[in-house]
């Protein structure tokens, strides 16, 4: 970052005092209560909506972390298309502001698919030479297919960076998305109540913003959540798997209070150093707890299924996964029509998922050109 911008963040920090986490009580000098700056909503596992309020102070601190993350992914010369949700969500607004803070240009297209449907989005990328795209993994895959079908070869696209938000996505699938765009693909992670929870390092691992958030996990139904070791990271090799709890660094995370997120994650301890040298815990998002399937070795998520199926090099980056009767209905896409007809890919993937994850699965293979019809 430029020196003036760095100083701006320092000034922000000088105005704030250490306080509570994303939903906790305020601890402010002189008894000052922080203003409730932003309203949003979240949807629980049963489809019910709940209000979410973020204070001005928490929003600013969140923006600082997000802007610092973008500073490692973008430059002031980048033109960034943001196809992230804005309505009753913090994602779009947060990404926009953080990108502006590092001096890059923003084209905000949202996700309504009305004012700016996907063909127009691709047209904007081409017309303005956009160098980065921020969107969900699913939208990145659909746009890549649409570009190919409309004879806009992505190997000559101006986009150099795809930054995925809003969906849990395996490293294997993220790499496939990057290959489809001939670009570097990275992910950011947040929850409806804490928009920026973990940010990527140079190696693509997501590190918890532990200077303002304490991340831990607790058991969820469906078996042991930490088969490789204790969840507190007491010995080497321990990886915690369970529901993510987020609190202030000095807060007890136990209980069903505001720290509970409903998100299933893997959390590595300080004993599992990242090659980048960063000491904060590495977090791997796995989706909602309610969308995991119980198994003998612990809850299995759609991201676990992604890790298995995307070992095959002939799959396009599309992926759909639904829970049904203690198993998964999975849809994958291929560019080779023969693979749809002969059934070998389907049988192979079903066998591997059942053997490696110990869950039932039904795999459907479709042609890339038929993807939208198949999953609609």
Image (cartoon, helix red, strand yellow):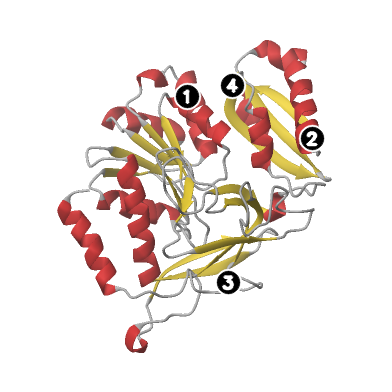
Q: Mark 4 points at which residue?
A: 369
The mark that comes first in sequence, 1 or 2, is 1
Q: What's the CA distance linking mark 3 and mark 4?
A: 44 Å
Q: Mark 3 points at which residue?
A: 258
Report the mark closest to the observer, 3 or 4: 3
Which residue is outermost to the top?
Answer: 338
Tell me how far mark 4 sits from mark 2, CA to CA: 24 Å
Mark 1 residue element: helix
Mark carried by residue 361: 2
* Dot 4 and dot 1 residues touching (CB under 8 Å): no
Quadrant assignment for the C terminus: top right
List the single residue furthest toward the left: 4
Who comes first in sequence, dot 4 or dot 1? 1
Q: How far apart are marks 1 and 2 (CA)?
A: 27 Å
For the point 84% across and 45% down, the residue is 325
User: Which numbered disc, 3 or 4, marks the residue that appears first in the sequence?
Assistant: 3
Residue at (42% x, 23% y) in the render: 182
Q: Find the distance from the CA under tag 1 to the CA under tag 3.
A: 39 Å
Residue located beneath label 1 in the image: 179
Q: Is residue 60 above or below residue 326?
A: below
76 left or right, relative to 73: left
């Amino acid at each position: 970052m430029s020196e003036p911008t760095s100083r701006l963040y320092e000034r922000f920090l000088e105005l704030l005092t250490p306080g509570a986490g994303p939903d906790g009580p305020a601890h402010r000098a002189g008894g000052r209560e922080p203003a409730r700056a932003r309203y949003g909503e979240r949807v629980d596992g049963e489809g019910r909506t709940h209000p979410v309020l973020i204070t001005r102070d928490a929003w600013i601190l969140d923006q600082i972390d997000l802007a610092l993350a973008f500073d490692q992914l973008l430059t002031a010369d980048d033109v960034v298309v943001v196809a992230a949700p804005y309505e009753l969500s913090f994602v779009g607004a947060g990404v926009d502001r953080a990108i502006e803070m590092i001096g890059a240009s923003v084209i905000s297209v949202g996700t309504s698919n009305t004012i700016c449907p996907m063909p127009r989005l691709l047209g904007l990328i081409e017309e303005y030479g956009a160098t980065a795209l921020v969107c969900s993994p699913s939208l990145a895959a659909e746009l890549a297919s649409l570009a190919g079908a409309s004879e806009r070869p992505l190997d000559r696209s101006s986009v150099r960076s795809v930054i995925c938000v809003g969906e849990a996505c395996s490293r294997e699938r993220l790499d496939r998305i990057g290959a489809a765009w001939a670009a570097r693909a990275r992910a950011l992670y947040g929850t409806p109540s804490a928009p920026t929870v973990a940010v990527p390092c140079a190696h693509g691992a997501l590190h918890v913003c532990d200077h303002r958030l304490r991340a831990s996990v607790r058991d969820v139904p469906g078996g042991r959540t930490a088969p490789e070791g204790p969840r507190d990271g007491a010995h080497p090799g321990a990886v915690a798997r369970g529901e993510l709890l987020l609190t202030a660094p000095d807060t007890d995370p136990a209980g069903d209070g505001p720290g509970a997120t409903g998100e299933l994650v893997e959390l590595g301890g300080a004993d599992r150093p990242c090659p980048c040298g960063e000491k904060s815990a590495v977090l791997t998002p796995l989706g909602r707890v309610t969308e995991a399937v119980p198994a003998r070795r612990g809850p299995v998520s759609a991201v676990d299924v992604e890790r298995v199926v995307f070992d095959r090099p002939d799959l396009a980056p599309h992926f759909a996964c639904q829970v049904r009767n203690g198993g998964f209905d999975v849809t994958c896409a291929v560019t080779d029509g023969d693979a749809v007809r002969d059934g070998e890919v389907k049988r192979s993937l079903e066998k591997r998922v059942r053997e490696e994850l110990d869950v039932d699965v039904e795999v459907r293979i479709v042609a890339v050109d038929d993807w939208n019809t198949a999953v609609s």
